[in-house]
Image: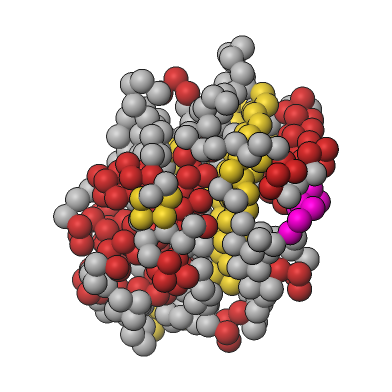
């Protein structure tokens, strides 16, 4: 079948342990959400045992066009860039360029002598105290270093990041300098907060490899894996496949999204201001499924090895300290706890049934702010990639939750 990115289709859903009628419930749900006008288009790709169980698309890439959304539609994947950045760093880890307990200042000396938020004085000014030590690489890859992001209006440091224009920097070098001028949100290793860490990882990749982030990803990940439409910008020959972005119009429908996270929507037909590891890639469902399948296979796909099985196991291991997981904190993006943790740029389901998750133990996952998401379930040998074109809100979150339910209610032969 066309536009499957070189991925093989299973002979039937039954052949890989799925009930075909029940698999159809996912497709029907996606079609209904498009028909109701909640999303312009939707693409879902479900794989098991390395074969496609279902690859369905509905709606349009652009509501002003009559052309249907194709399997080769290109989406802004935003934070699904982060796991790719993590894999890039792990490639360099395997070359002996860094270790998990290295201080980040070994590679980012701009971050020497960081200070930590300690409250505000009577005038509202931020008070600080010295950091006990520099954050480590382990903490950088697990969002426990203490950095902010500037996306959430929930903490004085977050507001300081926004006011300083950290994400509006013209280069990674300018970004790290702006980060250095701001306090950490907490002492390194003592809490989890979604942060600019993956963009800093991109700068480390650049400095260690001597290449731009984009060139490194193309040469070491995208090219070898056959991810032909993934990058920091489109090409002249595929730009017409870039899906438009939409957001809630406030009346139950959609309107074109002109900004994302208080910044203009990127024009991905042109080079970005900088190639960060946090949210700059575009990709297709099939391309990203190839990346996920490589992880599920222990670092290899179609005879090409990107990482060793041991490195994939390291990525997949929770590194958030137990004492952090044991205490809830409303500042966290997700309700991390002893049953749900975070590895190296991937969330990890440690004990899914305990918290009502239907995925298998050890499932890796993350998503993007433009309505894209994925999970990699090693216990059941499943990869799932979902792509819609709606900025993050309760409706896009519903897509993720319902997709999980529909996939696993159709799985008749769980586990490998």
Q: Is residue 353 left or right of residue 343?
A: right
Relative image position of residue 409 (x, y in whole percent)? 81, 51
The residue shown at (63%, 34%) is 55
Q: Is residue 208 left or right of residue 414?
A: left
On screen, residue 115 above or below 267: below
Relative image position of residue 308 (x, y in whole percent)? 38, 65
Quadrant hosting residue 227: top left
Quadrant hosting residue 392: top right
Depth check, front residue: 318 or 171: 318
Relative image position of residue 360 (x, y in whole percent)? 68, 64
The residue shown at (35%, 56%) is 306
Q: Is residue 404 left or right of residue 392?
A: right
Q: Is residue 106 magenta?
A: no
| Magenta region, residue range | 406-414
On screen, residue 331 above or below 267: below
Depth check, front residue: 75 or 290: 290
Q: Is residue 413 magenta?
A: yes
On screen, residue 53 above or below 375: above
Q: Is residue 191 visible?
A: yes
The residue shown at (75%, 29%) is 31
């Amino acid at each position: 079948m066309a536009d499957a990115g070189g991925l093989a289709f299973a002979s039937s859903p039954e052949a890989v342990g799925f009930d075909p009628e029940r698999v159809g419930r996912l497709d029907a749900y996606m079609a209904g959400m498009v028909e109701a006008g909640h999303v312009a288009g939707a693409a879902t790709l479900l794989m098991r045992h390395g074969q496609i169980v279902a690859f369905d698309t509905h709606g349009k890439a652009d509501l002003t066009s009559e052309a249907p959304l194709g399997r080769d539609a290109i989406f802004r994947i935003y934070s699904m860039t982060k796991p790719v950045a993590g894999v890039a760093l792990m490639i360099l880890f395997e070359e002996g360029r860094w270790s998990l307990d290295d201080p980040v200042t070994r590679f980012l000396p701009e971050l020497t002598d960081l200070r930590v938020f300690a409250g505000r004085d009577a005038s509202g000014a931020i008070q600080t105290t010295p950091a006990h030590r520099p954050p480590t690489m382990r903490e950088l890859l697990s969002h426990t270093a203490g950095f902010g992001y500037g996306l959430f209006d929930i903490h004085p440091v977050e507001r300081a990041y926004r006011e300083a224009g950290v994400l509006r920097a013209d280069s990674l070098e300018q970004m790290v300098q702006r980060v250095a001028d701001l306090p950490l949100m907490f002492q390194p290793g003592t809490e989890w907060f979604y942060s600019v860490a993956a963009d800093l990882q991109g700068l480390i990749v650049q400095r260690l490899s001597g290449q731009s982030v984009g060139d490194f990803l193309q040469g070491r990940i995208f090219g070898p894996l056959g991810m032909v439409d993934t990058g920091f910008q489109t090409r002249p020959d595929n730009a017409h496949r870039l899906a438009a972005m939409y957001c809630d119009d406030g009346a139950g429908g959609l309107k074109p999204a002109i900004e994302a996270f208080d910044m203009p929507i990127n024009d991905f037909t042109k080079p970005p201001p900088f190639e960060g590891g946090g949210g700059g890639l575009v990709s297709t469902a099939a391309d990203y499924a190839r990346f996920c399948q490589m992880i599920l296979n222990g670092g290899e796909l179609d005879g090409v090895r990107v990482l060793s099985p041991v490195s994939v196991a390291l990525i997949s291991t929770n590194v958030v300290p137990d004492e952090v997981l044991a205490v809830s904190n409303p500042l966290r993006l997700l309700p991390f706890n002893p049953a749900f943790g975070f590895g190296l740029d991937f969330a990890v389901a440690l004990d899914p049934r305990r918290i009502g998750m239907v995925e298998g133990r050890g499932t890796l996952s993350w998503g993007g702010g433009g309505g894209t998401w994925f999970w990699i379930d090693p216990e059941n040998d499943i990869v799932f990639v979902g792509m819609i074109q709606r900025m993050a809100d309760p409706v896009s979150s519903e897509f993720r939750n319902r997709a999980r339910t529909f996939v696993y209610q159709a799985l008749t032969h769980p586990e490998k």
